[in-house]
Amino acid sequence: MRKILHIDMDAFYASVEQRDDPALRGRPVVVAWRGARSVVCAASYEARPFGVRSAMPAVTAERLCPDAIFVPPDFARYKAVSRQVREIFLRHTDLVQPLSLDEAYLDVTQPKIASPSATATAEAIRAEIREVTHLTASAGVAPNKFLAKIASDWRKPDGLFVVKPAQIDAFLTPLAVGRIPGVGKVMEKKLADLGVTTVGELRGLAREELELRFGTFGARLYQRARGIDERPVEPDQPVQSISSEDTFESDLPLDDLAPMIERLAEKTWLATRKTERVGRTVVLKLKTSQFRILTRSFTPEAPPSSQEELVRIALALRDRVDLPPTTRYRLVGVGLGGFRERDALPVQAGLFGGS
C-alpha cells in the first residue's frame, strides 16, 4: 500500500506577491496583465469570493471584482520560491513528481527522515515550507495520487486532509463527479444527462457502458469511482507538451474562433512559464460538430519567444484548415510540443528576425 502526498501551495503567485508587498496583504489581488486578451494566472483568497478564478479572462475578473489589484506575473521570482519548496520535498523523499511550480506528488511510503506516519510527514513538510518561504501549503494524504489530489483541496487554504484505505468508499460516494480530475463542465453535463451527479451514482454504470460512451476515459471513470489509481509517483518526468482547449456551448464556424484561439494561446503560454523547458512546435487542435478531430502544427526555426508569436502562429494554422466553410466546430485547443532543455536549443535571432 503506497503512502502518497499531494502538496499544493495556496494561491501561489498571489501569495508570493502579498508576502513581498505588505500593501497587498488582505486585499483582492489578481496576478494578470490587463487587457482583453489576458487571462488570470492566480487570484488571492480575498478575490475568490467575488468569483475570480485562475484561467478566466482578465476582463471578466475586473468586472466581477472592480476593486481588485492587478499585478503582472513575475515568473522568475515564483520559480525561485518553487525551487526552495522542491528542496524541502527532497529532504523527505526522492520520489517527487512536480506537476507545476506550485504542486507535486510525493511518495513517502519509505521516507528518508524517520516518521511515525505519512500524515506526520505531511505536517513536517508544511511546517518547513512555512518556516523557509513564509507561505502556506495544503496537503492531501491517501493511498494513491487520485485521492491525494482531491484531499489536498479539501481544507484549503493551509489545510491537511487524510483519506485512509478504510475510508475510501465513504469519502467518494457523496462526492460530485466534477471533483474527478478530467471531468469538466461538458463531461459533467453528459453524465448528468445519464442521471449521474455523484461518484456513488457513477458506480452504478457498468464499465462496458462507460467505455462505449466515453472510450478510454470511460474506463478511467470506472476506476476512479472505485478509488483505483495504480499510477506510481514518477520523479523528474520531463515536460513533453502543454496545451489548453475549450468546448463551446454551441458549435461555431472557423472564422469565429480567433478570440478563443487567442485566449487559449495565452493560457498555454502562461503554463509554459511554469517549466524550465522550452517548447518548439505549435499545435492547433479542432473538433468538428461531427466529432472529427483535426490538428495542424508548425515548428519554427526558433521556439516562439512571446505570447504574441504563439497567437500569430496558432491563427496562421487556423488558415491551413481546408474544410468547407459551412463546417462547424465544437472544440478548439492550442498547444506547444517538442519541449527541450533551454541550453540544448540553438541560438537564433528570433522567429521572424531578418524578414
Image (cartoon, grey):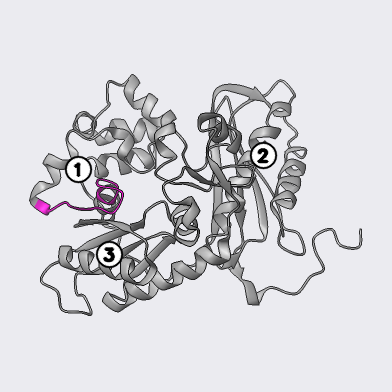
Residue drawn 13% across the image and 42% down it:
169
Q: Is residue 155 magenta?
A: yes
Q: Is residue 209 magenta?
A: no
- Residue type for callout 3: Arg
User: Given this view, does label 3 or label 1 mark the residue nearer the observer?
Assistant: 3
Residue drawn 34% across the image and 38% down it:
218
- Marks 3 and 1 close (CB-CB < 8 Å): no
Disc 2 residue crowd, few under 14, some 14–19, many 20+, Cα 10 Å: some
Q: Residue beneath label 1, please?
A: 226
Q: Which residues are magenta?
A: 151-165
Q: What distance separates the C-alpha of mark 3 from that of mark 2?
A: 36 Å
Against 78, residue 23 (above or below) is above
Q: Residue beneath label 3, please?
A: 126
The mark that comes first in sequence, 3 or 1, is 3
The mark that comes first in sequence, 3 or 2, is 2
Q: What distance separates the C-alpha of mark 3 from that of mark 1?
A: 29 Å
Q: Position of residue 168 (x, y in %)?
A: 14, 46
Looking at the rendered image, the quarter that the N terminus falls into is: bottom left
Disc 1 residue crowd, few under 14, some 14–19, many 20+, Cα 10 Å: some
Q: Residue beneath label 2, please?
A: 37
Q: Secondary structure at mark 1?
A: loop
The mark that comes first in sequence, 2 or 1, is 2
Please give left or right for residue 144 compared with residue 330 in the image. Answer: left
- Residue type for callout 1: Arg
Most extreme residue toward the right is 355
